[in-house]
Amino acid sequence: MSGRTRLALSAYAATLLAAGALIPLVEGVGWLVQAAVLLGVQSGVGALARRVPVARTLTVAAQALVTLVLLTLVFARDHALLGAVPGPQAVMRLGELLVAGGEDVGTYSTPAPLTDGIKLLVVGGVLLIGLLVDAMAVTFRSAAPAGLPLLALYSVAAGLSDGGAGRLWFLLAASGYLLLLLAEGRDRLSQWGRVFGGAARTKGGLADGLSGARSGSSPVRTGRRIGVLALGIALVAPLALPALDSGLLGGNGPGNGRGSGGGTISAVNPLVSLQNNLNQPENREVMTYRSNIENPQNLYLRILALDEFNGSEWRSSTRRLTDVPDRLPQPAGLAGDVSVTEVRTNISASRSYQQTYLPLPYPASEVRVDGRWRYEPEGRTLVGDDGQTTRGAQYEVGSLVVEPTAEQLAAAGPPPEELRREYTRLPGSLPGVVAETAAQVTDGSANAYEQAVKLQDWFASEGGFTYDTTVTSGTGSSAIARFLRDKEGFCVHFSFSMAAMARTLDIPARVAVGFTPGTMKSNGAVSVGLRDAHAWPELYFEGIGWTRFEPTPSRGSTPSWTRPDFPTDTPSDAAEPSADTSADPSAAPSADDSCPPLLRQEGGCGPSQEAGAAVPTNRGTPLGTVLLVVLAAALVLVLPLSPLLWRIRARNRRLGSGGRTPADAAARTLAAWREITDTAWDHGIPPDESLTPRKAAARIVRLGRLDTPAAEAVHRIAGSVEQVLYAAEPRPAAGLAEDASAVRAGLRGSAGRGARLRATLLPRSSVRVVWAAADRRTALAERWAGRAGAGRWTTRLRRLTRQHG
């Protein structure tokens, strides 16, 4: 097998091993088999093209064209010319699938169902990375940079899988890269013929450099050791950085903090799970509850609030978590003159319902629940810590029934400035029609309360909107404008649009996600199913706090404070609820192999998947954490290699071409001599400044055991130095860089393996950096002292002048 063929196979294997990190992201592994076949065809085309004497760029172009044909054949065959030729319609079809795949990635939780869009993303991504790796490592014969696309593939998988791409996948990806480097090393060594094994020394002290005493596999063994060492450092270094949570190798990410005040929660995208739950053929029960509230139809079970609108989606801000207090604090903005009654509710979650956030009536005042839960004060939510979910949870909640009057809401004062600024923030991409429509609908309103009621009534009854759960979902600026135009959608569209319009009116608003009250059962318990998933807007009024509104027609119940003469709910005198057998879910969903992918994604098929109104997703790593990771990686990698990097820079600067004047020629000669003395120093021959260039050259030849070509090169440069230092008209020297390289090769050839490794990684001459820094510090101190002395003499002179003036 030729070296190039071995290198091509190694590039193929490295790409597949790195692609394994994508397995936790999607359901099944059939896509990987398909990607392996297509990648093999792509690599084979490259191998055939390289056998033909054509330009390397044409080889890459041929592979790219074949890759496009393969993707067309698999994903857009019906739109292609002759079933395989990528015409305009096929290209458009691939573009549509890419857009759909991007939307699916942003909405589904992992492992996501293998939709056509997601399949094109993962298979096409593997082929693209494979093309880059094959081009760099095989076509252009530079395997080291090929690690960058492999790292990019693994990094994307690690970032999207929320810890699923762990150490195993990292080891596989790193092993593939090391295999690629090893194959390239073998290929390069084979081109040399006989390997330079070490410097076997003759009786005369000179090394012939061609002794076969050392095994030709020595460089291979050294490369393996370096690779294993680098891989070990990469695995161990993150463990020494405890602040870098949720890194490429996993670890505790957001929401897993411990101790008081530790940990954070990040954004949740409830869009897909809401729509899928509402469209389920069977309303599978996810929880039941009992409460002493008289009318449970007003008892919404709230999961969390989405309070940040960035133009593309509504999401929950990153917040700090604390320990769950025995008694939750008073709700923000609630005054003492508002009617408030506390009720008790016992909730029993199905074992098929696995949600990170605990559904609670709002505002909860006390929560008694077993397990590892943390409290987020701003949204008054409980989030599971260290893998804690709602599966099979039974808990008791005390909550407040806040019953403001229309007069109290109308008389509400301005909200706190900080709260108003945060909860009225809107992106610049929001179309002007949103604010214009809000102003038209609320025209003539006397206060924010009347504006909110008019918005609610316009959506619920007066605006001609139709409730339809089959409408394409979306929460961005364009989706809101489309909803206002088409007037068709479900709770997500109604709540998000009303919240955005309220913000344009300077009313603080956010969107709550959870469940409507559910259905009463014959035994007195209330059953909550998948179809009860819901979203509703919450608007802030000073003195009342966050207040629920219901703009979605035919869903939930209209709040009493938004319509006149509506009876309020008061708690009954019934006995306190208890978590008995009747409160348990009556029909726990069970896993079924025939379960549809979307239903399995929502947890309706069994305990292995999450279900509910909102599926937590990772908002992304904060910028500060990214900067810390980059800085730590730079410190870990650059600091140990700084002597090597400085030495390479110094060598390139000294041996680089300069000007053409005699002064430039003299400078080049002295720089080449400095490079030779430093190279000898790196190999254990310290410089002796007391010797003349000629004697110093003889000393380097003797101690370095240089062969004849290297010894002649040293003496030529020494003679050039003497010409520069002593001749009246120095003759310009030629071939200084080649002579310096020959001396360096001779010194390396005569040195042992350990001496060569030290000369490369820890060159002794790098101490010149420390000396230079010390000299600069001394010069700066002397300059500063001189300025300070001059200042003192100037001050004294001024005083004398004033005294005798």
Image: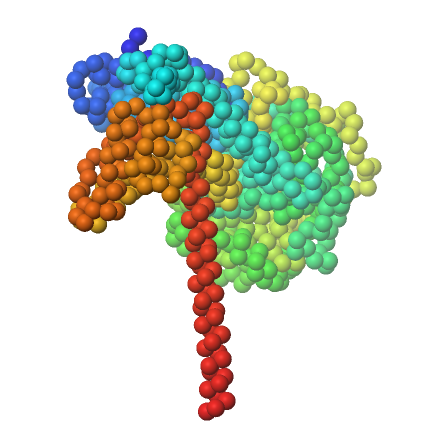
**What colouring method underlies this structural image?**
rainbow
Can you say whether 692 is above or below 211 in the image? below
Residue 579, how many percent across, how many down?
Answer: 78, 30
Left or right: residue 302 compared with residue 503: right
Query: Percent x, y for residue 786?
Result: 45, 67
Depicted 569 relative to depicted 26: above or below: below
Is residue 324 among what the camera can see?
yes
The residue at the point 46 percent across, 56 percent down is 778
* In the image: residue 784, left or right of residue 383: left
Q: As rendered, which of 515 and 28 lies closer to the eye?
A: 28
Taking depth in this image into account, of 385 and 526 the one nearest to the observer is: 385
User: Which residue shows up at 63% across the image and 48% down it?
Assistant: 378
Location of residue 286 in the rendering, given as x and y in whole percent from the top left corner: 64, 27
Can the viewer see residue 460 in this picture? no
Residue 711 in the image: state x and y as whole percent.
28, 28
Task: Please tell me which residue is depicted at 62% across the width and 21% down the height of the picture.
Answer: 607
Q: Residue at x 26, y 31 (%)?
A: 713
Q: Quadrant of the N terminus?
A: top left
Q: Foreground: 693 or 732?
A: 693
Residue nearer the viewer, 631 or 334 = 631
* Residue 171 to residue 673: above or below: above
Please identify the residue farthest to the top as the structure is shown: 1
**Number of numbered discs on residues:** 0
In the rendered view, would you say 756 is above or below 635? above
Quarter-of-image position of residue 253: top right
